[in-house]
């Protein structure tokens, strides 16, 4: 089940919110939320719920053992076993086929390939479960002695299948005690509506443009068409993923939880370093706290630590060589900025440093998009105008027809919300201003959600990019 589906918007979410708010006891709310989350995850492929339950159950028991043996060597053994099992589950389902396929490329070597499919959201919930055990070992959080509460943390449907990667320390207190306020519920609806619009109104239409350009079977586009498709993908992946994070954060607020931000206007960054402080923040902070710093961070072997983190970051996104190349591409850019270019970037005009960042992020998304290396090289040649077979006139018409869409995307990727918030704060200083703000907010929420539902009714094209991660 996806957030941008009619069954979720018209049935699952309203029913869940109704049942959740009918009960008053937080313990009963937790049961309602847990059952709803398990139904949500089991909707498409019920068998994979067993994998999630097994992973969370293993980490639950290891957490208890670590807490019981705190300060002893055995605690570290239990930590290693927990990480090994959690990562082992991820490796089997996500990477086994990749390794066997590559081993079979070696002459005279034949390894049996399995037909294991990828459980939705496994990369996200395994990282959450693993972070809980590590934090228990470090003493950053208290061990959770009730399994159903840990399972609720791992399986909570707003952030289950595509993040953000929520730390147990962020919501452990709210699992025990939380309050749903009218103001929080309203802000949650607004945030959800914005995220839904990003996905349904922008990302879906951008996806159609990407499919007809970069996704064309023979890359039958001119250089203009290739660049048009790449810019469309540049915005599609942002609105698709940040839209999902907005919906997750919004639904969390409706339920009384406060998830941390996952995107902070990354396309306004003035360097690659700044871009990665603004993009998929929860993943970046995970690798920083659980890989980079334990390896030595900035204190020793910094370049090696960066290499390991970015190789893992790339490989986390998918079992394909292009993702590893994509991760190492950013390692090179970040290392170059850190050791050679950092001071020069600061002295550059914002327009130039921003254009530099956008250009290299664009090339990065090209590496990310093509899992087939032969198609990647064809796309690179097309961008340079080498060997293109498409019609420049036809691609010019395509670009012209989508100029308004691109303009909207540019504005929507800027911090417009901050300006709106300032206006709301000023208006709310008076009684009539508050009434006007409340009225406009309700109209906005209803209009956006109804428009998105209308778009979904009239279209069968509704992909979600991060399902495969």
Image: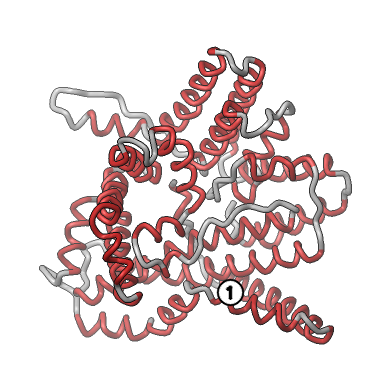
* Residue at 68% in and 33% down: 150
Rendering colour mode: secondary structure
Q: Does residue 225 sit above or below 296 in this rendering?
A: below
Q: Which of 83 and 469 is in front in this view?
A: 83
Residue drawn at (60%, 38%) of the image = 46
Relative to the observer, which residue lies in front, 445 or 176?
176
Q: Which of 356 and 435 is in front in this view?
A: 356
The residue located at (42%, 62%) in the rendering is 237
Looking at the picture, how far across and down is residue 39, in whole percent?
67, 43
Residue 54 x %, y %: 59, 27
Question: Going by the image, does 125 lie left or right of 433?
Answer: left
User: Of residues 374 and 238, which is closer to you in this image?
Assistant: 238
Query: Secondary structure beneath disc 1?
Result: helix
Residue 234 appears in which quarter of the rendering?
Answer: bottom left
Q: Which residue is drawn at 35% across and 67% down?
A: 210
Question: Residue 110 at x, y = what percent?
Answer: 22, 24
Lateral position of residue 376 relative to residue 209, left or right:
left
Q: Residues within 10 Å of mark 1 (few under 14, many from 20)?
A: few
Using the rendered view, name the quadrant where residue 169 is placed. top right
Residue 291 horizontal side relative to residue 45, left or right: left
Vertical position of residue 163 compared to residue 94: above or below: below
Query: How many numbered marks, from 0 up?
Result: 1
Residue 69 to residue 326: above or below: above
Residue 186 lies in quadrant: bottom right
Pointer 1: what residue?
417
């Amino acid at each position: 089940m996806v957030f941008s589906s009619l069954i979720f918007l018209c049935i699952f979410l309203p029913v869940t919110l109704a049942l959740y708010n009918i009960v008053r006891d937080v313990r009963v709310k937790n049961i309602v939320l847990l059952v709803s989350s398990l139904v949500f995850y089991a909707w498409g492929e019920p068998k994979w719920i067993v994998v999630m339950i097994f992973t969370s159950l293993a980490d639950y028991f290891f957490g208890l053992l670590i807490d019981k043996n705190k300060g002893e060597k055995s605690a570290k053994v239990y930590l290693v076993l927990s990480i090994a099992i959690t990562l082992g589950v991820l490796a089997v389902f996500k990477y086994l086929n990749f390794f066997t396929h590559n081993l079979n490329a070696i002459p005279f070597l034949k390894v049996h390939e399995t037909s294991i499919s990828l459980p939705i959201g496994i990369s996200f919930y395994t990282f959450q479960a693993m972070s809980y055990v590590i934090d228990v070992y470090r003493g950053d959080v208290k061990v959770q002695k009730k399994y159903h509460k840990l399972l609720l943390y791992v399986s909570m449907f707003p952030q289950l299948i595509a993040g953000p990667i929520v730390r147990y320390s962020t919501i452990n207190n709210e699992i025990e005690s939380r309050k749903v306020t009218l103001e929080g519920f309203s802000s949650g609806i607004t945030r959800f509506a914005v995220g839904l619009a990003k996905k349904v109104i922008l990302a879906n239409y951008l996806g159609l443009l990407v499919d007809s350009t970069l996704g064309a079977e023979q890359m039958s586009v001119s250089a203009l068409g290739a660049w048009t498709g790449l810019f469309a993908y540049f915005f599609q992946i942002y609105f698709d993923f940040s839209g999902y994070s907005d919906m997750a954060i919004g639904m969390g607020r409706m339920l009384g939880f406060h998830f941390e931000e996952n995107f902070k206007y990354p396309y306004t960054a003035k360097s690659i370093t700044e871009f990665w402080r603004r993009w998929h923040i929860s993943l970046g902070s995970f690798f920083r706290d659980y890989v980079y710093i334990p390896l030595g961070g900035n204190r020793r072997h910094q370049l090696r630590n960066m290499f390991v983190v970015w190789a893992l970051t790339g490989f986390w996104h998918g079992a394909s060589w292009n993702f590893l190349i994509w991760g190492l591409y950013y390692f090179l850019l970040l290392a170059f900025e850190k050791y050679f270019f950092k001071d020069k970037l600061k002295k550059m005009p914002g327009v130039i440093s921003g254009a530099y960042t956008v250009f290299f992020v664009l090339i990065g998304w090209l590496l990310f998009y093509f899992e087939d290396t032969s198609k990647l090289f064809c796309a690179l040649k097309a961008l340079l105008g080498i060997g293109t077979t498409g019609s420049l006139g036809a691609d010019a018409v395509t670009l012209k027809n989508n100029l308004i869409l691109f303009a909207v995307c540019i504005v929507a990727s800027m911090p417009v919300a901050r300006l709106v918030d300032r206006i709301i704060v000023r208006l709310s200083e008076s009684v009539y201003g508050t009434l006007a703000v409340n009225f406009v907010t309700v109209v906005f929420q209803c209009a956006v959600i109804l428009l998105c539902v209308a778009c979904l009714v009239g279209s069968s094209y509704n992909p979600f990019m991060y399902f495969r991660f």
